[in-house]
Amino acid sequence: MERSSVTRKTGFWEVVKSLLSGLQLTWRHFRNADKRRAPVPVMDDNYFNQPEGLVTLTYPYEAIPVPENGRYRLHNEIDDCIVCDLCAKICPVNCITIESVKATEEIGMTSDGTKKRLYAPVFDIDMAKCCYCGLCTTVCPTDCLTMTPVYDFAEVDIKNMIYHFTDLTPEKAEEKKQLLAKQQEEMAAAKAAALAARKQQG
Amino acid sequence: MLAFLLTLMLLLGIVIVLAYAERKVAAFMQDRMGPTEAGPFGSLQSVLDVLKLLQKEDIVPAAADQKLFKLAPILIFAAVFAGFAVIPFTPDLIPAGIGIGVFYLLAIISLDVVGLLMAGWGSNNKYAMLGAMRSVAQIVSYEIPAGLAILSVVMICQSLDFQEISYQQGILLNRFPGLEFETNWLFGIEALGINTTNIGGITTWNIFRAPILLVAFVIYFIASLAESNRAPFDIPEAESELVAGFHVEYSGFRFAVLFLAEYSMMVLVSLVAVILFLGSWNTPLPNLTALKFANWTTGTVGELSGILWGGFWLLSKTFVLLFLQLQIRWTYPRLRVDQLMHLCWKVLTPVALGIVLLAGIWRLLMV
């Protein structure tokens, strides 16, 4: 087949023809301006099959839905979290900071029936550092750490990129720490007393 | 004074619409959306742009030639705006109905070049200087084919009066003082024996009255694109190489005036094209035996209907040409300087000279 686009065409009428075909092209696009690209997700069969019409999506008002298994902003459902620290350990960029305080008694149950024995006075995820690898969500034993479809969370102040997931106020956390210290003191005292009693007997 | 104000208001209105249309048309041709936020469908965008420009600081560069720099935008706009003085908007509405309108128009819009050079030189900036030089070279060159194309119309019409040229292109021919006993013949050839004086419509437009003027129209249209620095002849303000050409140093109100002058120039050249070639304010619909389309869509001269129909036809034809200018901008790539000069001096000027000769012969057939 001869490649007609490559062969050089000259002459007045050829030039006129090419000028007109140019105008025809822009006119065709102008005429199709009443059609719009539909905001369908990439999984849709028609995603690559929308050759006509305006391609712009007016973003804040409409957006292409993200895939369900997409990796975007992290969310921790703190009620289900057993503060096992696995996510902080696996994180390749160290963006998760967890402090834990042992509870004096059993706190409750997660939704999958695991017992909770630790408080988390600090559970911070620095989304500015996060590399969206998703490893933390894989290791999470109670599936409380998940990735949400939210991707538009830019901030003016970078401090706001640190997300705090703890449900304890600083005062509450201090109280729990003191409770634990008190319990440990009591236990130590009881132990000491028991030891002393055994020595006396022995 | 009233004519001045009315024309200025009309012009501002058209320019606002045009600036909005430019952005929307550009967007649609590139499969984008254009302005959407300001007002319904972004229709207030250009108004807001103007308001924004008026609030901006009026910066005069320290090294600029103060007087030239400050005067240039006013001179450029005044030159273009003065051209509107002789444009007949309706059969009996013309800001200044002088007998040598065509000559005056060509003379006054040539002043534009002086202002451009003042702006480019006064800015003391290499891009502005290059832009102004290119602009002047281009406008001065393209005035020749444009002038020759207009000359061929003047030869066919035997008049330098825009209003007389307008009356000749429609059913109102005999209403113009001095043309009471004139007749329009099909294609202007009396020997064919088809009298189109009362048919009017498109058959009496200049491009139909003397089909040779169709070529003159194309030449004029190409030259007018170059005169208003529009793509594909926008090398004076080639964004990609000269930033913005001669107005690169301007800001605030002065920039707004330059912008206005540029769009006014587009409107003016389109108006002149419509008046000289496309039947001016005359309706395109001819009288067909019992169906008097031309009479119905002309109105009564001197009454409101005449003014409304005349203004409607003139402006709608102008907007068609303006749309074509926009479409051409988004279709064709920019010409190189040498290609530009080649087109002007080696193609358009010789062809236009030939047209002038043929127009003279055609005129002999018409009487």
Image (spheres, rainbow, N blue to C red):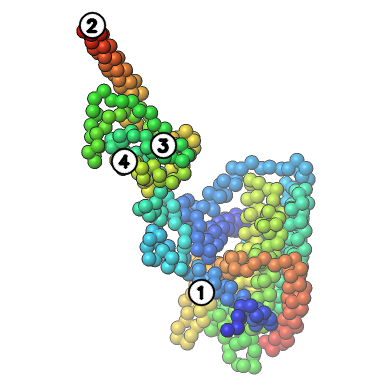
Tell if the residue under mark 1 belongs to the same chain as the one under mark 2. no
Q: Are marks 1 and 4 in contact (CB under 8 Å)?
A: no
Given residues A50 and A136, the one toward you in this image is A136
Q: In 3D space, how far apart are the residues under numbered discs 3 and 1 (Cα atoms)?
A: 85 Å
Q: Which residue is mark 3?
A: A89
Tell if the residue under mark 3 belongs to the same chain as the one under mark 4. yes
**Chain containing mark 2:** A
Task: Write the residue at 76% across / 78% down.
Answer: B350
Instruction: Label 2, secondary structure: give it.
Output: helix
Q: Which residue is mark 4?
A: A141
Given residues B277 and B305, the one toward you in this image is B277
Q: Is residue B36 left or right of residue A140?
A: right
Given residues A109 and B275, the one toward you in this image is A109
Q: Which residue is mark 2?
A: A200
Tell if the residue under mark 1 belongs to the same chain as the one under mark 4. no
Q: Residues within 10 Å of mark 3 (few under 14, many from 20)?
A: some
**Identity of the amino acid at label 2?**
Gln
Q: Residues within 10 Å of mark 1 (few under 14, many from 20)?
A: many
Where residue B303 sits: x, y (%)?
A: 51, 68
Q: In 3D space, how far apart are the residues under numbered discs 3 and 4 (Cα atoms)?
A: 13 Å
Where residue B171 sits: x, y (%)?
A: 56, 79
Instruction: Label 1, secondary structure: give it.
Output: loop
**Disc on the earlier residue, 4 or 2:** 4
Q: Residues within 10 Å of mark 2 (few under 14, many from 20)?
A: few
Q: In 3D space, how far apart are the residues under numbered discs 2 and 3 (Cα atoms)?
A: 47 Å
